[in-house]
Amino acid sequence: MYSRDQTIKLQKETESLLRLIGNQSFPPGKIGLLRDVLRFHEYRYYILNEPLVADQEYDILYKELEKAERENPLLISPGSPTQRVARDLTKDFPTVQHLVPMLSLENSYDADDLVGWDRKGRELTGLKAIEYCVEPKFDGASISLIYENDLFTRGATRGDGVEGDDITTNIKQVRSVPLEAAFSSYGINQIEIRGEVLMTKKNFQKYNESLAEQNLAPLANPRNSAAGTLRIKDPREVSRRNLEAFLYHVSFYTHTEAHSKNRELLRTHSGNLEMLWNLGFRSPQKEKKVMKGIESVIGYCHEFEARRDDLPYEIDGLVIKVNDIALQDQMGMTTHHPRWAIAFKFKARQATTTLKSVEFQVGRTGAVTPVAKLDPVSIGGVTVGSISVHNEEYIREKDLKIGDKVLIERAGDVIPQIVKSMAELRKGDEQSIHFPKNCPVCGSKLAKEEEEAVWRCVNIECPAQVVEKIIHFSSKDAMDIRGLGEANIRKFYELGFLNDIPGIYQLPIDKIGSIEGFGDKSISNLRTAIEASKSQPLHRLVYALGIRFVGETTAKVLASAVEYLPELKNKNLEDLQNLEDIGPKVAGSILRFFQIPDNILMLQELEKLGINMHNERQKKSIDGHLDGKSFLFTGTLTQLKRSEAEELVEKNGGNILSGVSSKLDYLVTGEDAGSKLEKAKKISSIKILSEQEFLRIVGS
């Protein structure tokens, strides 16, 4: 529909309009251009599913057009984006009509917007204060479901709001959507309910890990993953992605005389959510909050935004709805959105910017990671100027070039990522990104194993690797040498005070004392921390060595398998694979580490410097009630840190596993327990404990 030249021109106009808005009064003469720009972005979003602006940038343009047309009603055009909903759809699935149009919500970004919206509602209803129901605004893909005579009969995407794609078969793969629900107990024959399909953060990470194991490119973000999954033609693949659905709105129903015991729930929105919850749907029954007056709502919005990242799924705001259904009907709706609901959007998590350059950084395992340098841009209150672009294949998959306009996103785990490049906006002077053939630090030739996507520097004396290994060795979860943080390690390395891991225990403390910022107290603390690290348990030393694929749990398994650390060099692949949760890949990495002469020399030097190499077996509890019992923790514990809970198990003679299997005796569950809990339920020999039950067992 739009040529390459038109695309570039309209994107330039977009950037010009965004700069204009907010800086001065919007000129009526620009309304026609603003409409053209919005139509262009609707096409990119609704038809191609390839947006060129972030959601908030589009909202700014749309709200400005609404404002300009209110101020200049004679300039309103029947074809304006504010006067109709786009009807064009992709035709991958049959098109069906919604029983009631799926209107979009009016958006707000601050307290003033909510106060103004509330004032209009009170003027319209004559009430002094309105009762509202507030719930999360899920960041997924909108769906509409129809149930007839208690059976699920149809699922559809939002589409253009009037018609959507029939995705019934794919919806059936979403296990949180019941195939049968007793709506008849509420006197309901037919009902249309609205909701959102999403992928939890945990499932998103797990699925991306499975893609990485197959050397496939990761998915961009949970929202796009959910929307894309609904249009996959293979239902088995849909099922594998473990989508979930929240149902949060009853848009239409027909009924006989409602059962008297249930009639009250149908009179309020919060009651509808309770009904859906009672019928087996995952409605925001637990997340919702009912309150009276807009001031309470505003306070709750700010409170909720501060803890949005604690949720197991992504949200981009809250939705505020008038709770009384009869009052909703009285307030009605415009041609675009209901007057009785509004979305409070959190600070932007997406933005567009320019990719200026790429730097290549070397990690402790020699992995060379490309890092994109961007024109700094604020996302969700954080300025982002650098983003890891992972590896050569990722760059190729995203089709990234220096000079590209890119869409970036700051996900719930606060790690920013590039969602996509905007190839349509290229002017021709963009530069391809060439992955180096030699290490950018030491110049050694890079190598890549056949089954991996990562290029590595194989020179173990590479300065970049040496520094990163020292940082890891000294870190909190390893040898825990406080006062020897990353900044100090880099400074000591540059000054020639620290050249390798054993050098930590030979630091010239007297010389360090002459450096600005190092007083007597900091020197004393550093000396104490270094000395204390010599007595750390053996498993901490094993983890500190930075053996590839060996995390904290595997380090404990290795430490428990020997009385004296150098004994590990005598174990073969079979010996290692016989240990708990150690497979061929991990065993091979351990074997290679202990076959390198320089690593053995380093261990010998560390031992001479007084570092503990022996496994001091934990004394078992007197009654031995956890002796030989295996534990695993999942979810968030409220009274203990995970490390404290694991230490309690080990002190009482038990051991920690890294995954759910028939070898597991106890799974201890905290808040938001996920897939491990579901897997454990299928193995009858595993006993599932709450945190309180676990504490009673260990006697704490």
Image (cartoon, grey):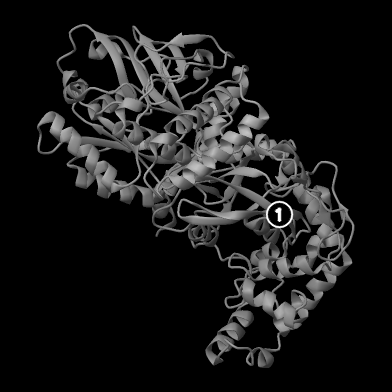
Image point (72%, 71%), residue name? 613
Q: Quadrant of the C terminus?
A: bottom left
Classify residue 340 as left or right of residue 458. Answer: left
Image point (57%, 86%), residue name? 517
- Secondary structure of the residue carrying tag 1 is strand
Name the residue that disc number 1 marks: 357
Above or below, comparing residue 531 to residue 38 in the picture: below
Q: Quadrant of residue 278?
A: top left
Residue 327 visible, this angle: yes
Image point (81%, 60%), residue name? 593
Q: Quadrant of the N terminus?
A: top right
Q: Nearer the viewer, residue 199 or 592?
A: 199
Tell me the kind of residue under disc 1.
Ser
Residue 662 visible, this angle: no
Q: Position of residue 139 (x, y in %)?
A: 45, 35
Q: Position of residue 510 (x, y in %)?
A: 67, 93
Q: Total marks drawn?
A: 1
